Image (spheres, rainbow, N blue to C red):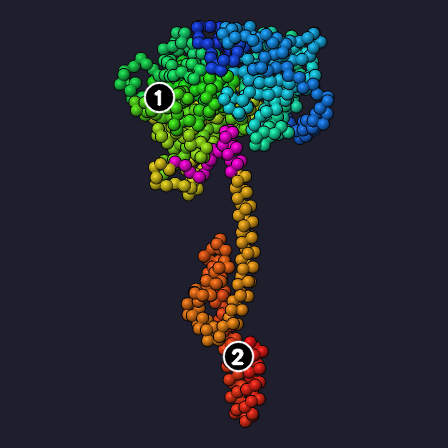
Amino acid sequence: MTGNKRESNVSQNTEDTDEYAFDRMYNKRKPESSFSPTIPLPKNGTGLPMQIPGPHHIHSLPSEPEETYQITDTLVARMVLHDSQRMANPHTLLNRVVYDCIDPSPMHYKQSSMSKRNRKSTLGPALKPYYIPMSKDDTTLVFESRFESGNLRRAIQVYEFEYDLILKFDVNTRGHTQWFYFSVDNAKKGKTYKFNIINLLKSDSLYNYGMRPLIYSEKDAKEKSKGWYRGGTDICYYQNSIKRKSGYFYTFTFSYKFENDHDKYYFAYCYPYTYTQLQHYLATLEHDPVRRKLFRRRTLCQTLAGNNVDLLTITSFSCDPQALQNRKGVVVSSRVHPGESNGSYMMKGIIDYLTGPSVDAKILRDNFVFKIVPMLNPDGVINGNYRCSLAGVDLNRRWSDPSIKLHPTVYYTKEMIRKFKGDRHIVLFCDLHGHSRKKNIFMYGCNRVGRQRLSTRIFPRILWKIAQYFSYQDCSFGISKSKESCGRVVVFRELGIHNSYTMEASFCGASFGRLNSRHFSTKHLEQMGHFFCEAILDYCDPDQTRVDEVTRELELLYPSESIQGATTNPNAFQLTGDNDSIGSDDEASDSASVRKKKKSSKGSKSKSSSKKSSKKDKKKKEKSSSRRSSKMERSRPPSVTKKNAMKTKSKGGQKMNKKSFSREGSSLSHSTSAHTAAQYVSKKSRLLMRDSKKRSDSRTQSSQSKRRSEMEGGGGDGPIRTGSSRSKRHR
């Protein structure tokens, strides 16, 4: 592979680095719906009615990057006050259910009596709306989400122009509400409607940092060729008063002023990328006379609902078989979490680049074999899930031991990687994701130890130098306990692929550079896929100038002394410097960390209180024991006391008389430590020595006074009585 003649269609040193350099190529591209080959229909696997075909949206680029919303300081307080006023005045509320995606509508109850066979045969345009306007003056919105990737469980009209919305939980779960995608009709021009999504679970959201929802107008798309755009006012995210099992739900609220009459509007969390859209895209590539020669498409497996999981192999096939065998491998996957549709747009950028006509793409195809799984969780994508599969589990937590029946996509992907690694050396594995709490695009990796401690940081550093809105500062290379069974960690530990990453793209935008306080568009996400491919070229270039430069930078940034946890154990992969649980997008890990914090705080409080109580008990016990010891020694003869005192003095205060130790030791609690007991014994010995010393002093004084009186010639009784009276008073 020769990297000296690289000719990239995205070069950082030319004007093509402008974020709109792809406009010509992007806008000239034929829409995916212009060719409609025979593709498999999506299957939701739940038996619920679904409109087929689903909505079709055009993809047009905004003239400028769309700005984020500027939130005022009093906005959340106003929304909370409005909610409290609603609760205080329930008689003013309509509380009318105007949409439900599962329960039958009372306006046409006959639809609920349809047989299962008829419901399957009437999928599509035969689905009637839940609510039908009663007159032209009726301002009630007509909601719909019974289409592919749609998610809206119920809509409740609170006031004339305000609605509470409830999202569907992921299939077979009781959580993971984040993704929404629905349409509204019968909106009145110039009227502002307020929407409150009231059953969200995460404690924070990018909506509090300027993110806007996506809006699409069918009339604007037809008349103005306007695609998805960001919109809405009074956008905020806060905790509401609706209780759940552990805490409270959260509300995302926004208002929107409709600009058209007799128009259908769509609202979405992120740019939708459906299973049908992927099938159209791959079929279009297969019917392209040039690109079809550059990749192979086959079915990896089938999901629980019976949808095909595609596997693409991209390389130069017209070559010597030995040369093909010597090529290195790269594995890329996306959409294991179905609600992270921005990962599909990055994947689309990678596929477009690798099957494109550029010289760099040809160099990659001539030197690598790419295995690509564009959609790991088709069932979740079709049903509008945010995180889980049809089995109700997070597939990105099943890599350590996937079930061939319950998690077939992960099982066969893991086996594919294992077999692929047996055929050739795999340079890199990357799983594409979206992030709902952090801005920018960044990576999660895995730390190594010893001389190769910085090797897994080189590729993200190179990507940071190439991509304008990739943030190396947000990258993390630790392995938290909650991530030990995710794809990145299992591929790193079990399959032995050191460059194993998760690339996360924010649902919002960047926090630095030219895109600071701007939203990412689909073009930016696709462009990130181009940058990813260029980083592979730089990383594997025979001219390792860039790699050596990056290595020197990393050695300065991370000296060996600053990275702790390095051991000689080859299986010890985690260093304590970075942890990917910081800023995690995983609800399970976040809730677990919250529970741990609560438990630790409770434990620390109980420990501190127990320590305080133990100190008080110790003082009381020491006082009582000293009193008992003094009483004991007063009742004993002086000879025994002196003997015990000499014994404790000769032993250094470490031992006592067995009888006294057993008697005094019974007053100690079982929780008293050995150190405390030793202190107690030494204190007791000091008390014994002090008493014995006082008695010996009194005896010496009495004998001296007796001798003095005898020497002075006084009566024997007087001085003796005087001495005995002193000794008694002393005692």
Q: Residue at x 47, y 65 (%)?
A: 660
Give the residue at mark 2: 698
Instruction: Determine crowd level at label 2: few under 14, some 14-19, many 20+ residues with C-alpha closer than 10 A.
Output: many
Establish if 611 lies above or below 375: below
Looking at the image, the residue that sits furthest to the bottom is 713
Measure the alpha-carbon separation of dots 1 and 2.
Answer: 95 Å
Give the residue at mark 1: 416
Q: Residue at x 53, y 36 (%)?
A: 595
* SS for callout 1: helix
Along the viewing direction, whichever of 363 and 685 lies nearer the viewer: 685
Q: Quadrant of the C terminus?
A: bottom right
Looking at the image, the residue that sits furthest to the left is 322
Instruction: Mark yes or no: residue 108 visible.
Output: yes
Mark 1 / mark 2, whichever is N-terminal: 1
Q: Is 586 within the magenta? A: yes
Give the image location of residue 4, x and y in percent.
Answer: 37, 22
Give the image location of residue 327, x and y in percent.
Answer: 31, 21
Q: Quadrant of the N terminus?
A: top left
What is the magenta range? 573-596
User: Quick check: marks 1 and 2 in contact, CB under 8 Å?
Assistant: no
Amino acid of disc 2? Ser
Q: Residue at x 37, y 37 (%)?
A: 572
Q: Which mark is residue 526?
A: none
* SS for callout 2: helix
Instruction: Determine crowd level at label 1: few under 14, some 14-19, many 20+ residues with C-alpha closer than 10 A.
Output: some
